[in-house]
Image (cartoon, rainbow, N blue to C red):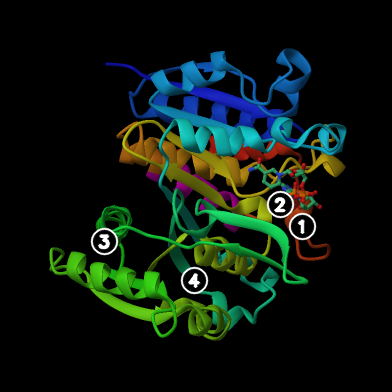
Amino acid sequence: MSKHIVVIPGDGIGAEITAEALRVSQAAAEKCGFSFTYESKQAGGAAIDAYGVPLPEDTIEACRKADGVLLGAVGGPKWDNVAPELRAEKAILGLRKTLGLYANLRPIKVFPALAAQSPLKPELVRDVDILIVRELNGGIYYGDRQEAVTVKGIEQAWDKEGYSRPEIERIVRLACRSAIGRKGRVTSVDKANVLATSRLWRKVAAEVAVDFAQVEMSHMYVDNCAMQLVLNPGSFDVLVTGNLFGDILSDEAAVLSGSIGLLPSASLGDGTGLYEPIHGSAPDIAGQGLANPLGTILSAAMMFRFSLGNEKVAAMIEAAVDQVLSDGYRTADIYQQGQGLTKVSTEEMGQQVINRLK
Ligand SMILES: NC(=O)c1ccc[n+]([C@@H]2O[C@H](COP(=O)([O-])OP(=O)(O)OC[C@H]3O[C@@H](n4cnc5c(N)ncnc54)[C@H](O)[C@@H]3O)[C@@H](O)[C@H]2O)c1
């Protein structure tokens, strides 16, 4: 049966980057004898302009029925002053909630051809290939909170962190499954020396690991992990952690690659998956052909792997991206003068990837 996807360009550079990801997806699928259908829907600022809300019902319904959703990015200065519940970014939170997306997968790879552009020394980042698996639907971001109140003359506020065994089990299982076929190592990150939730996390993670004989599980405190990501990033394979720690560590790790425009992500639940680059809508460069589409193209590859069940198309796209970078093609964000590189536009980069699909 043919698979169906929803493409949400969103705002800013969203239309340019999703157009290239779609073109590459169609070309790769065709080469592999695979077919899929797609429809475009609106979310974010574009949806506020058209429907008055950031995530219209029509978009939600289409996403629920689809096998995968490919999203560009949402938001921009035009919608910065709307009411908080109407903010463009609410579209992402709404999609995560509606689709029950509890896991965020962020692969952090340093392409050998770009190692010199990392803020760390090339020899430290050359082997970096980390998959960060972040719990997305629980923890302190979803716990009870008390906004600032004054009690006995002292202003105070609190947020509650909570995790249940099933929430921890499903994310750690996903991390362990993801490690198979990689180096087979999972680092579970917590703060078990201080936090009760982390002690439960560590206990459950260790129990889950027993079911995965091929996987070697270790545990690391989050402060040490933040340090090791800079000192020895090549030592990690799969890293699994809760919502708050994952948010911070995944942004820290993202800078290793040298450009935010290169990194893909997948958000998974039990049904439709959501795939998007990790960057925002980059309003400063929108409409100028300057955006790097590779993060979105690699997000589409993840969609083929996790939601469309076609590893061959995923691997073909990833290999073509590797080759384009080795061949010296660069969008403005990763271009350096005087090194024999070829500067290309968003569309030309998409075409160069297509030319190398095999
Ligand atoms: N998931 C999302 O949709 C998402 C995520 C983050 C931010 N946002 C929104 O995006 C808007 C802009 O946010 P921001 O400026 O803080 O972050 P941003 O990621 O959009 O841009 C940060 C910097 O990186 C550059 N950049 C980003 N993506 C690039 C690409 N593909 N190629 C080349 N350069 C790229 C931009 O030009 C900018 O200089 C805001 O409205 C923000 O709320 C959306």
Of the residues under marks 3 and 4, which one precedes in the sequence? 4
Q: Of label 3 and label 1, which has the lower sequence position?
A: 3
State the image quarter where residue 350 is shown: top right
| Residue located 32% across and 53% down the image | 167
Q: Are marks 2 and 1 in contact (CB under 8 Å)?
A: yes
Answer yes or no: do the residues labelled 3 and 4 have beta carbons within 8 Å? no
Mark 3 and mark 2: span between their CA atoms? 35 Å
Q: Residues within 10 Å of mark 1 (few under 14, many from 20)?
A: some
Q: Is residue 324 magenta?
A: yes
Residue flagged by tag 3: what amino acid is it? Cys
- Front of the two marks 4 and 2: 4
What is the spatial separation of the Cα atoms under label 4 and label 1, in whole angstroms?
Answer: 21 Å
Does the closest atom of ligand 1 sit within 8 Å of the Cβ of label 4?
A: no
Residue behind mark 2: 330
Residue 188 in the image, given as x and y percentages of width and height: 36, 72
Q: Nearer the observer, disc 3 or disc 4?
A: 3
Residue at position x 82%, y 65% from top? 338
Type of residue at label 1?
Answer: Tyr
Q: Secondary structure at mark 1?
A: loop
Disc 2 residue type (three-letter): Arg
